[in-house]
Image (tube, grey):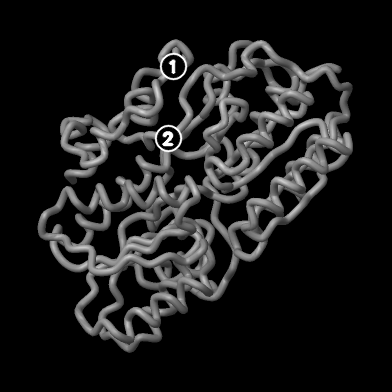
Amino acid sequence: MKIKKILYTLLFSCALSFSSNVSAQELCTKCLDNVPQDVRDYVYNMDYMDPLQPLGESPMLNWKSTRTPPWTIGYASTYAGNTWRKGAMERLMEVVFPKWKALGLVDEIVITQSNLDDSLQIQQMRQMIDGGKVDAMIICCSNATALNQTIKYGWEKGVPTFSFTGYTTSPYSINTSVNYQLVGFYIGAWMAELIGEKGNVVVIEGIPGYSASDSQNNGMLAGLKEYPDVKVVGQLAHNWTSQVAQKELSQWLATHPEKIDGVAVQSSGETGTLQALLQSGRDVIPPIALGGELGALCYWRQNANYIDEAIYAWPPGDEVEFGFNVMMRTMQGQGPKIQSILVGPATNSFAEISTFLNEDCDRNSTGWANPGIENWAGKEYVDNFFARPADPTKWKK
């Protein structure tokens, strides 16, 4: 497949439509000295990088918390109204928090919700900092720039910020995620090839203006653009919520009778997207991008020839655990070397999803499949990005 050539041998990287824009951030190459060359060429290839992704040397390279554990962690969440956030919260409170509490390193997680209101999120973060309530802050999927002054304020007060599943452009935060532009390009090119490199595609992004959404959307469009006979006939947004995806796509389909050959949709909107297509009355259900929602994966489990792989951009449980692990290492003084610790996309074949889904699965399930933290951002992988790597679970106060 052409996508395999592009992404693994990088023969055509100079042709990408967004490559000329990659100039806003310089890559700290010395920060990647211990990262295997093939990973550097793939995950940190600047031809597939969001131009705003922070890639400089980490300000926390020689920092450790002066506060005595157990630490109190603030989770300034932006939104709670979708299945992805539910999946992340379940992993955080049912797996991650009990683990670190049992180790005597975390005593509480203080959670706030801002419902996509940047001003409210800033207020909540400052209240946690000023009240001396937290020793570190973790955030998710936030606006790339709106929190920068608050992140700096926290840093000056000894409260560092860690952003998972979405970066901030602040030089005082550490970011953990997939390389969004890369995974978006992968999905776009995969979709084009799946439909025979010609036809009409609808692109559905998450929340415009949020880094994770914008980066992946730009990558999708660039991947699709590599195929001149593929036409993007619609661009929608679903707030990373399946109910919104179902509503928006249903309304769009009602006024667009033309043939749709594929839908490149960001998680977590694939289950709603699929439901809209099934309810539309179209004889052939066009393929959509699947990224972990069990409801949509169930349709594939029951229709083996529907697509050929699921592509994971941000598995919720693994993402929050990834970010939390990096935060705990940093608090211990292990010294993150680069501002953004990135991974590549993960995939599942039909045979692989058949190991955890039976044919009698529920198409309306709101659960999520996760590759597993060791398959997403395992200990040995993360070690490469720290100056003094060690098992954080064995750290002594």
Tell me which amino acid carries mark 2. Answer: Leu
Relative image position of residue 87 (x, y in whole percent) = 64, 56
Q: Does 61 sit above or below residue 183?
A: above
Instruction: Specify whether residue 387 is in view.
Output: yes
Relative image position of residue 38 (x, y in whole percent) = 34, 23
Relative image position of residue 110 (x, y in whole percent) = 82, 46
The C terminus lies in which quarter of the figure? top right
Q: Does residue 168 appear left or right of residue 114 in this picture?
A: left
Reading the image, the residue beneath label 2 is: 52
Residue at figure coordinates x 16%, y 37% from the top left: 15
Tag 2 secondary structure: loop
Judge by depth and name the residue closer to the eye, 147 or 362.
147
Question: Residue 236: which quarter of the image?
Answer: bottom left
Residue at figure coordinates x 59%, y 11% from the top left: 387
Q: Residue furthest bottom?
A: 281
Choose mark 2 or mark 1, whichever is in front.
2
Give the crowd class for mark 1: few <14, some 14-19, many >=20 residues within 10 Å.
Answer: some
Question: Label 2 vs label 1: CA separation?
Answer: 14 Å
Picture disc at residue 28: 1
Q: Does residue 222 appear left or right of residue 31 in this picture?
A: left
Tell me which amino acid carries mark 1. Answer: Cys
Relative image position of residue 200 (x, y in whole percent) = 20, 68
Q: Does 303 sit above or below residue 258?
A: above
